[in-house]
Image (cartoon, helix red, strand yellow):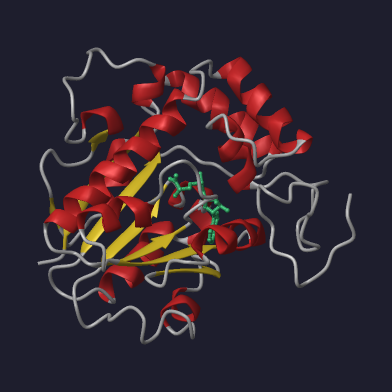
Amino acid sequence: MSEASPERIWTHQDPDYLPPEIDTSKPSIARVYDAFLGGKDNFAVDRAIAMEGMKHFPDGGGGARNNRAMLFRGVKYMTEQGIDQFLDVGSGLPTMDNTHSVAQRVNPDARVVYVDNDPIVLAHARALLQTNDNTRVITADLREPEAIFHHPKVEGFLDFSRPIGLLLVAVVHHLGDDEGPAELVDVYKSRLASGSYLQLTHFCSCAPEVRALEGVLLSMLGTGRARDLKEITRFFDGLELVEPGVVHLPEWRPDEPVKLPLDLAGNCIAGGVARKP
Ligand code: SAM
């Protein structure tokens, strides 16, 4: 492995370089998710969790792919409603398509800030975004909303007096009940201007196999809780749910007819999009 140098940026063209802040001995949520998606930006310690998870939850990564697909349908929808700025908290590693590419296909001037508490996301996204002036990435924690709203790269770049698209996609299930996830989401909602949207997805306890996957994630990764549809719907309190409401992800405004009943991958995550009145 090459020696770390702060001047170097991690890119796929420079695959041997690893930024010094990346610890490959401990699993990372972002990298485990990348392994579920079949990506290449993960290490043995992450793949071990994905493989154990797949033993108990053999969906072939379909749940993660459904989540990504619904994320993009939601971003496209919000951009078509006129939303031109997005705060994507718990954004994960960039993959083949990303929030900014979807939004900027509809509106090239749409601004996006990616937020993740895993430094690997910043290291990776920096290279991708070098030439995109309308997209930024910061390292910050979902649990500290004020640090995000007042971050120097966010303040003045996103205008919180205007409608915004807030993405909390597959991230709130990484908060424990003792961390008050619903109250935390309420703080974010209270900061949104009228006409803003929240898109949120969450592991759903609707299928019994999800509990087995939850057990693997909690024991090996220390995080990843399933909640039921009522609890997930609670996150949208005070907002107007966009049709069809809070549903299993393949059923949220699908581009093509959905095959029912949903399979394991279809049942494991639920979510929706809602507008602040
Ligand atoms: N939102 C992306 C998606 O749905 O495709 C990525 C979801 S991935 C399952 C969850 C991401 O949330 C990971 O990248 C992880 O590092 C990040 N994350 C987890 N807890 C966080 C926290 N407290 N603050 C910020 N990011 C967090």
Q: Position of residue 256 (x, y in %)?
A: 18, 23
Q: Position of residue 151 (x, y in %)?
A: 48, 82
Residue at x-position 55% and y-position 42% = 224
Residue at x-position 19% and y-position 76% = 193
| Image quadrant in which the C terminus is located | bottom left
Above or below residue 150? Residue 73 is above
* 132 or 29: nearer the viewer: 132
Above or below residue 117? Residue 153 is below
- Is 17 placed left or right of 179 in the picture? right
Q: Position of residue 236 (x, y in %)?
A: 24, 55
* 227 or 260: nearer the viewer: 260
Above or below residue 176? Residue 21 is below
- Is 75 placed left or right of 253 in the picture? right
Label count reads 0
- Is 143 placed left or right of 206 in the picture? right
Task: Indicate the quadrant where residue 166 lies.
Answer: bottom left
